[in-house]
Image (tube, grey):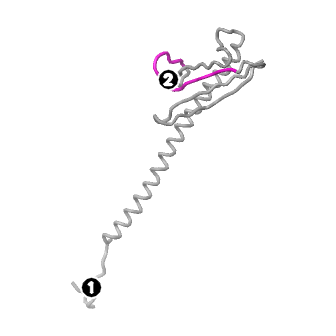
Amino acid sequence: MCSTTGKPPSQTGFTLIELMIALTVLIIGVAGILTLQVTQLHATSYTRHAGEAAVLGEHKLEDLRTETRNPACVPPPGSPCSEARNADGTIVTSGPGDYTVSWWSSGTGPTKWEVSVSWVERGKDTHTIKFQTQTP
């Protein structure tokens, strides 16, 4: 159909190529946002577990510091001990816990205590936080 001037009417709307390019740009942008979201969730999970592990480790160091006068509660020097604990600090008596708390001492001179708290992140990554203190 021609206008009165003999020229074809101007086209309105988008071509298929323009729509495909716009969708491609939109998909790349959404993929970038989703990648950032997943990374943020993993970082938040690690931070939460590291905070809980720090509390458990500090609590075990305090227990060892105050129990050094009672030999029944303290392992012999150089002998590691460990226990499984849940995030709330309760000891797990059967099966794995959320965290594994291990401790040992040097036993020479002023006793140097070492505590490590380990956990598994997302079923595959093992993380450990270590603490040290010294008792007279």
> Whole-percent x and y of residue 51?
59, 32
Disc 1: which residue: 8
Residue at the (46%, 20%) spot, across then down: 95
Residue marked by disc 2: 97
Task: Report if residue 103 lies within the magenta region.
Answer: yes
Task: Give me the C-alpha separation between circle 1 and circle 2.
Answer: 76 Å
Label 1 neighbourhood size at 10 Å, few (<14), some (14-19), many (20+)? few
- Whether pointer 1 and pointer 2 mark residues with C-beta atoms closer than 8 Å, the reply is no
Instruction: From this view, report whether residue 19 is shown above or below residue 33.
Output: below
Q: Is residue 122 left or right of residue 53?
A: left
Residue 123 percent location from the top left of the image? 46, 34
Question: What residue type is disc 2 on?
Answer: Gly
Residue nearest the viewer, comparing 107 with 37: 107
Label 2 packing within 10 angstroms: few (<14), some (14-19), many (20+) = some
User: Where does the image place residue 43, in percent across and percent down from the top left?
Assistant: 54, 41
The boundaries of the magenta stretch are 90-105
Using the image as rendered, state which of residue 89 and residue 9 is in the foreground. 89
Q: Is residue 7 above or below residue 19?
A: below
- The x and y percentages for residue 4 are 25, 89
At mark 2, the secondary structure is loop
Task: Inspect the magenta stretch and tell me whether residue 134 lies in it.
Answer: no
Front tag of 1 and 2:
2
